[in-house]
Amino acid sequence: MKLVKCNRCGEMYSDSYRNCPFCEEEEHFRKGARYTGPRNGRRRETRRRAPSIVGPVVILIVILILALLVWHFLGDKLALRRSPEETPVDTSDTVTPGGVTPGGNGTGDGAAPQSGLEMDKTLQLAVGQSGTINVSGGTEYDWISSDPTVATVNGSGEVTAIGEGTAIITATDVGGDSAVCSVTVTGEGGQSGGDSQSGGATVNLSGLTLKTEYGTTIKPYETGKFDISMKKGEAFRLTVEGTDAAFTWSSADSTVATMSEKGTLKAVNKGNSIITGRSGDTAISIYVRVS
């Protein structure tokens, strides 16, 4: 027996082998055969295959697709649960730079919109008369008069006419909601809502309208009574159409709305107020709602 050197792998092996045992062993490893032990003091090991990233990538893609599908079908509902639902603001009755859209009493003929407490918006009395203001939507009310020299009010909403002029009666319930009523007091036998004299000019209340600087005409919902809805911060100039008489303006609550001497109406804060315009014995009122 003699040793032969393999021309392929360079190993020495006995010539009793027909073929190089080391090459045959290597071939077995390549075909997946298990390692059977050392040969001639050497250990041969199989090569481990590198881990594949195809599987994790496919799983990640599937998770992303599922997340997109969930958001597509349930995203709106999830967003609503995360943030408290806000009460939608009705913008149908707002004043815009392009004009005024009062709720049912500007250029249209509908009824005035309601907000907060429901209360009589106007009351007309002669000096010495009494009348009760109807209010609903609350429980107990606190009453206050803007001008006790014109009209006073008791805890039951009963108004007593003291002197000629206009006063604003405000009712506030225990929850903080409030509403206002414009009380016009005339002299005994005086007229309200018809023709009156102011500086020698006749003012026909039934024919009065308001006009904005943008050309929009606001019709009264009742003789001499107007209703306008605005948004906080808005302002525009008003003129009284149908008379040449000059009016002086005052606000029942200047923290909500104001009117300048030139007739610029401005919404200051959210709430309700009544703007009163006087010309001699004539008085008109504008119910202003600020949202």
Image (spheres, grey):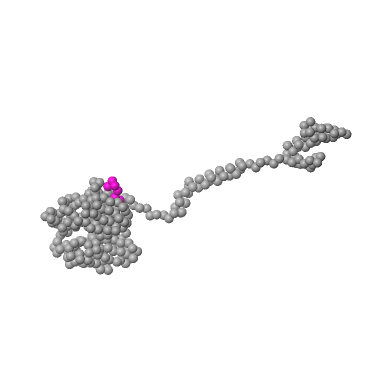
Quick one: which residue is furthest to the right in this view?
1
Give coordinates of residue 74: x percent, y percent: 48, 49
The answer to which image quadrant residue 19 occupies is top right
Quick one: which residue is furthest to the bottom in this view?
155
Q: Which residue is drawn at 30% across and 48% down?
A: 96
Q: In this view, does 122 lie to the left or right of 139?
A: left
Segment colored magenta: 94-99
- Quarter of the picture holding the N terminus: top right
Q: Residue at x 28, y 56 (%)?
A: 257
Q: In this view, does 25 lie above or below 215?
A: above
Q: Nearer the viewer, residue 135 or 22?
A: 22
- Quarter of the picture holding the C terminus: bottom left
Give coordinates of residue 229: x percent, y percent: 29, 53
Q: Is residue 203 above or below residue 164?
A: above
The number of callouts visible is: 0
Give coordinates of residue 201: x percent, y percent: 12, 53
Q: Which residue is drawn at 27% across and 58% down?
A: 254
Q: Does the magenta stretch include residue 183?
A: no
Residue 272 visible in image:
no
Q: Which residue is drawn at 63% across and 41% down?
A: 52
The answer to which image quadrant residue 170 occupies is bottom left
Q: In this view, does 76 lie to the left or right of 170?
A: right
Quick one: which residue is furthest to the top in this view?
7
Residue 291 visible in image:
yes
Give coordinates of residue 44: x percent, y percent: 76, 40
Q: Is residue 29 left or right of residue 135?
A: right
Q: Is residue 125 left or right of residue 234?
A: left
